[in-house]
Image (cartoon, rainbow, N blue to C red):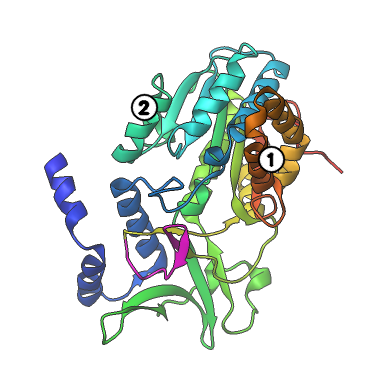
Amino acid sequence: MNDFRDELAKRDLGDTFRRLIASTGPISLAHFMGESNQRYYADKRPIGGQGGDFITAPEVSQMFGELIGLWMADMWIRAGRTEPVHYVELGPGKGTLAGDALRAMKRYGLVPKVHLVETSRRMRDAQIKAVPEAVYHHDLSRIPTAGPILLVANEFLDALPVRQLVMTEEGWREVMVDVDPSGAFVEVPGRQHMDSAVPEARRDAPPGTVIETSPASATIMFEVAGRLKEQDGAALFIDYGYADGRSGSTIQAVSGHKKVGIFDAPGEVDLSAHVDFAQMEQIALSRGARVLGTVTQGQWLGALGIAQRADALAEFAPQHREALMRAKERLTAPDQMGELFKVLGLVAPGWPDGPGFARE
């Protein structure tokens, strides 16, 4: 089976798409993105400063994971220290966040069972080194249902496929991917009427308007919120995106820390899109979870005391002060990760409010 998978990975995904389109017609942009990212994450180790395509917050500084761990421990303690308790991470990258968070939790008596939801064999290899006690799952369905969950998803939703709808002179259509005479991939409007898939308040938009939805993200949010209601717990979704409904295409491709064309190299580059946190909140509410709110990453980390943590670490290791201050700035500054990245907090109905989500 592994030999078969390795052989598939060697095949050019772009050629596979071209043959499919020639046989069946244009494919949806969501199909293109989903298949591309499935190949990309199965075949590469994308995270890292050197040799990777992008870097995530846990790799910037240990402070990020530590503050998440302290937030989780605080929530668990104030909710009554129920056992068993499960730490769940979706798309755990290299395991860095989990390692830092679990170390911080342990200082406050929280030693949860660890569950990592990961489908990439290559990524699991790195995670095993960082979190050897983890149990692995392909999806949420196998996570235990007894005991509260403390769930984290950092830069997970952005990689799930999005569906784009475009307003044409004939009405709303889904954005499809076709091949032009030169063999290049191009976007084209689909033939099927899609007006019923657009919220009524947005149906009269001018031609050229594009809106995005992510059925895959909605499914994840629906299940997580249901879990919180049924078995208690708290969840943090951290990603780049917006807190209010917007129009326009946000899909981008990154390779070697630089933006490239989304059709340049299917399966070889990371494709992602901004998360619609307003929609995610509505889905969570529909399932009975309590929404603490969506705030910027800079605001959330600031409220949790990242400045004080950076000073404490610098006092302990003064030779690293400059690097620590740079890392804090990268995580919190509005012109870096602080404004673009958002933090969505969810809790079970009976759980307390969480720090960092101050109510006006």
Residue 124, image x, y percentages: 34, 34
Identify which residue is drawn at 52% across, 60% down: 273
User: Which quarter of the figure is the C terminus placed in?
Assistant: top right
Residue 75 left/right relative to 13 = right
- Residue 246 visible in the displayed image: yes
Q: Label 1 amino acid?
A: Met
- How many residues crowd around disc 2 within 10 Å: few (fewer than 14), some, or many (20 or more)? some
Identify which residue is drawn at 64% across, 48% down: 330
Residue 292, image x, y percentages: 73, 38
Residue 352 left/right relative to 330 = right
Residue span colored magenta: 253-266
Location of residue 63 (image quadrant): top right
Which residue is labeled 1 in the image?
325
Earlier sequence position, callout 2 versus callout 1 = 2
SS label for mark 2: helix
Residue 206 left/right relative to 12 = right
Residue 342, image x, y percentages: 66, 48
Identify which residue is drawn at 62% across, 75% down: 203
Residue 336, image x, y percentages: 65, 54
Q: Are marks 2 and 1 in contact (CB under 8 Å)?
A: no
**Which of 29 and 183 lies nearest the eye of the viewer?**
183
Q: Please tell me whether residue 321 is drawn above or below residue 187 in the rendered image.
A: above
Location of residue 200 (image quadrant): bottom right
- How many residues crowd around disc 1 within 10 Å: few (fewer than 14), some, or many (20 or more)? some
Which residue is labeled 2 in the image?
128
Q: Label 2 amino acid?
A: Ile
Identify which residue is drawn at 64% across, 79% down: 205
Q: Residue furthest front?
A: 319
- Residue 288 visible in the displayed image: no
SS label for mark 1: helix
**Which of 33 and 50 lies nearest the eye of the viewer?**
50
